[in-house]
Amino acid sequence: MHRIFLIGFMGSGKTSTGKRLATELSMQHIDLDAFIEARYCKSVQKIFSEDGENYFRNIEQKILLEVSEYEDIIISTGGGTPCFFDNMHLMNRKGFTVFLDSSVETLAARLQTAKVQRPLLQNKTEKELAIYIASLLEQRRPFYDIAQLTITANNKNFEHIQTIKNAYLDFLHKLKQ
């Protein structure tokens, strides 16, 4: 069971952490949203706008089921992935889950300067964005809190990589016992 699932709110650093962690552990990395975009030849934003969130969440679950069978893989999920269907329990059964926990202020700052437009954040002022993040984070936290490891990820120095790596190796060691 050589899988790590990185979960957390959009902008928490799942993809950048996943890439660095994959290098550290000599594993492959998949960004779930990028995988979906490549498979469906559409951006997540376009899927949301053309087909709706329910359609996207069904695709997301289907792809999550597929990639959760891959070995030696780190999967950076979408921010909402753990909150739908039985996705969080699936990830806990199939591998090691890590919640990258960031403050509302950190998330708002990162998302305001993000290169990628997020469908759920469009047309929001700075204040509306912070309120929206706080509200959605509160709704999602019960799902995120089911992760096997929670890491505070408010800065970009990636100190948390070593902590995740050590916790994952401990997890594998316990599986062998």
Image (cartoon, rainbow, N blue to C red):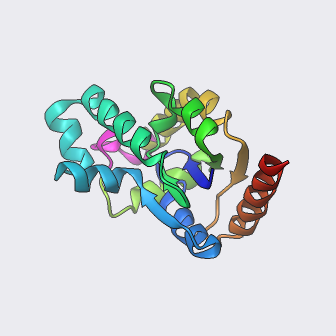
Q: Residue at x 40, y 51 (%)?
A: 32
Determine the residue positioned at 55% across, 68% down. 27
Outermost residue to the right: 177
The correct choice, above or below, for 4 with respect to 159 in the image is above
Residue at (26%, 46%) from the top-left corner? 44
On the image, the x and y values in percent for residue 138 come to 58, 30
x and y, in percent, of residue 70 in the image = 48, 53
Q: Nearer the viewer, residue 43 or 166?
A: 166
Q: Position of residue 20 (x, y in %)?
A: 57, 72
Q: Residue 94, image x and y in percent? A: 59, 41
- In the image, taking residue 136 as reference, residue 96 lies left or right, namely right
Highlighted magenta segment, given as a residue range:
118-127
Choose between 51 and 61: the one closer to the eye. 61
Q: Residue furthest left?
A: 50
Q: Is residue 165 magenta?
A: no
Above/below status of 38 relative to 142: below
Tell me if residue 29 comes above or below residue 148 in the rendering.
Answer: below
- Give the mark count: 0
Q: Residue at x 80, y 51 (%)?
A: 176
Which residue extends farthest front?
176
Q: Is residue 120 magenta?
A: yes
Position above or below: 90 against 99 = above
Left or right, residue 166 beside residue 156: right
